[in-house]
Amino acid sequence: MKKWLIRCLTVLAMVCLIPGIALNAKAVANAFTYCIQCKADKTCDILGYVWQSNADSIYHKIRIKCRTCRTENEIIYKPFSYHTGGTETPTCTTGKICRLCWSEYGILGHDWDAWTSNGDGTHTRRCKRSNCDAVENESCSGGTGTFTCTTGKTCEKCGAEYGILGHDWGAWTSDGDGTHGTHTRRCTRCDKEETESCSGGATCTSPGVCATCGGSYYGGHDWGEWSSAGNGTHIRNCKNCYKVDTASCTGGTATCTAKAVCEACGGEYGEKDPNNHALVHPSAKAPTCTEIGWDAYDLCVRCGYTTRKELPALNHDLVRHVAQAPTCTEKGWAYDTCSRCDYTTYAELPALNHDYQAVTVEPTCETDGYTIFTCSRCKDSYTADPTDKLGHQFGAWSPNGTGSQSADCLRQGCAHTGSTDCRKFTFRTAEGETLTFCPVCGQAENAAQLEKIEAATAWAASGSLSAEDVTARTNGEYLSVAFETAGSLTQPTGRVRLALPAGLLEGKTLVRIAPDGTQTELPFETEHGKLIYTLDFANSELPVMLFRLVPQTAAL
C-alpha cells in the first residue's frame, strides 16, 4: 500500500513539473478567437491556465478547445491572460506566484549602477536596489592602441586607463671623469633616460665612491631647495660649506587672477596679467517665445569676464481658435496656439454628463410605480426602479344581504369597492342547534351579526400562514377566527398564535366548538395586556375556527 501511494505521489509531482500543465486548470469561460485547425475565428472553451517555468512577466497562456473541430491550443488571450495575485514582494531574482497559473512573474532583475574602476585593472558594479547587495567584478578590457611603459588602453566599460607596463630599467652608469657627480640608466624598451646624483660620502672638497654606480666623484655643493626671497628672487644654501646662491625668479605665466609662479622656488612674483584670460566660446542661441537668447561670445572660466549680450524672449504669437461648448455627451474645448512654437492653451472641457432629475410615479392599487429620470439640459429620459402595484387594501367586509359581501379600498385616492361571494360554515352549537355564518363579513343566519375585532393580531408559530390578515369577529356570544386576503379565505397548515385584547374576554372563558359540536376550553397566556391563544390548524380541514364566550362560572 505504501509503495503504491509513493508511486502516485511521484507521478503527481512529475505532472506538476511538466511545462504547460496547471493542476488548477478548469473551464472558466469561452473566447471567440482564431482556431489553427479551422483557420478562422471560432468560439473556444477555455480549459485552464498554463504553468510555465520561464513565464512572461505580464501574461500567461490559456489552453483552449475549439467547439467546432475540438482542436486544443495554447494562446495568450488578454481578457484572461493577465497574471494576478501573489503576496510575495518581487525582488531582483524572485517574483510573485500567479494565483491562476502558478507561474512566477514580475521578477525585477538587477538595476546595475555604472562600472567603476578599482585602480588595479579591474572594475566593479553594484545593484542599486536597496534590498539587493549583488556585486559584479570584471577585468578591464577593450580599447585601442598598444601598451607601453607610460600609457595603457582605455577600458570600454569603466573608462579607466589600464595595462601601463612601466619602465624596464638597465644598470646605473657613471656620467664622466668623476667631476660630474651623476649617473644615468636607460629603459630597455623605450630608451627613456633617468639621471640622479651620485651618493657615497663625497663633499664639496673631498671625493667619494658612488654607492650606486661605483664611480669616483666630487660631490660639489650639496644645495638645499630654492626658497623665495619675496622680491622676485630666490636663494639656496650649500649643506656642507654654507655657500649661498641667489637667482631671479623665472618661469610661470601670470593670468587675469594670479601672478606668475616661479618654476624653481614655487613662489609668486611679478604682477597679474588682466588680459590673459582662459577663454571659452559658447555658441549662439536664438531667443524663443519663452526664453532669452544670445549671440556667440567669449567667457573666461577663471574670472568670469564675458562679452555675452542677451537677446530678449520673443513672447508667444497667439492665434485664437473657435471654442466648442461641451454637451451632455460630447466634450468641448477653447484655446489659443502660438504660430512659432507648440505652445497651446488647449484644454478639453469634459462632457457635462446628463443632469437627470428624478420624478417618482408612486404605484397604485392597480398600476405599477416607477421613476422617470429626465435630463434638465437635453431632455434625454429613461425610466427605472419599477415597483409592483400595491393591490387593494380592503377594509372590513360587510354583508350585502344577497349571499355576497363587499368592502371599500382604504388607500387614499382609490374609490374601488370589492365584492365577492360569502363562504358560509355551519357548526353544531348545542343539541339540535347550529350556527351558520360567514367568517369574512360576519353575517349569521340564526344569530346576531359578528362584528370585526380590530385589535386582533395573529402570526404563524409553525407550518405556514399564507396570509396574516386575521379576521376575528364576535357578537358577544360567539367568536370566529379566520384568515383572508381580498375577501377570500386562506388555509393555515400549522399552529397559529392569536392575540386578543384582555378586556374583550373579561369574566369569560374561550371554548372552542368543533364542527361536530364538541366543545373544549382553550388555555391562554397573558402578555402586555393581551391574551395569547394557540390555534392548531395542522389537522383542520376548515380554514375557520368557532368559539363560544362562556361566563367563567359556567365554563366547561
Image: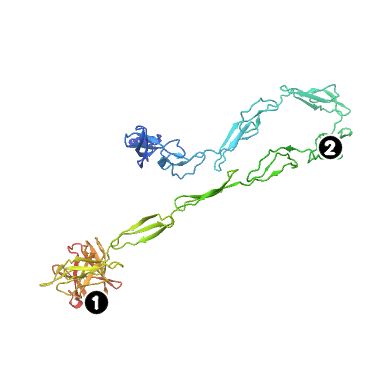
Residue 389: % across, % down: 30, 60
Near-viewer residue (358 or 140): 358
Mark 2 nearby-residue class (10 Å; few <14, some 14–19, many ≥20): some
Q: Could you say which quadrant of the image residue 449 lies in?
A: bottom left
Secondary-structure class at tag 1: loop
Asked if residue 96 lies left or right of residue 159, the reply is left
Amino acid found under the numbered disc labelled 2 = Ser
Q: On the picture, is 385 further left or further right than 394?
A: right
Image side of residue 133 versus residue 423, left or right: right
Inspect this view and state whether residue 348 appears: no
Identify the residue shown where x is 28% and y is 68%: 410
User: Residue 40's spot in the image, x, y percent?
Assistant: 36, 34
Q: Residue 395 appears at what percent x and percent y?
A: 26, 69
- Which residue lies under the disc numbered 1? 506
Instruction: Write down the residue under mark 2.
Output: 227
Instruction: Check the picture and name the quadrant holding the C terminus.
Output: bottom left
280 and 521: which one is in front?
Answer: 280
Camera-side residue of 468 and 284? 284
* Above/below status of 222 relative to 190: below
Secondary structure type for disc 2: strand
Q: Tag 1: Cα neighbours inside 10 Å, few (<14), some, or many (≥20)?
A: few
Question: Which residue is depicted at the point 75% across and 24% down?
Answer: 192
Q: Quadrant of the N terminus?
A: top left
Image quarter of residue 151: top right
Mark 1: amino acid: Glu
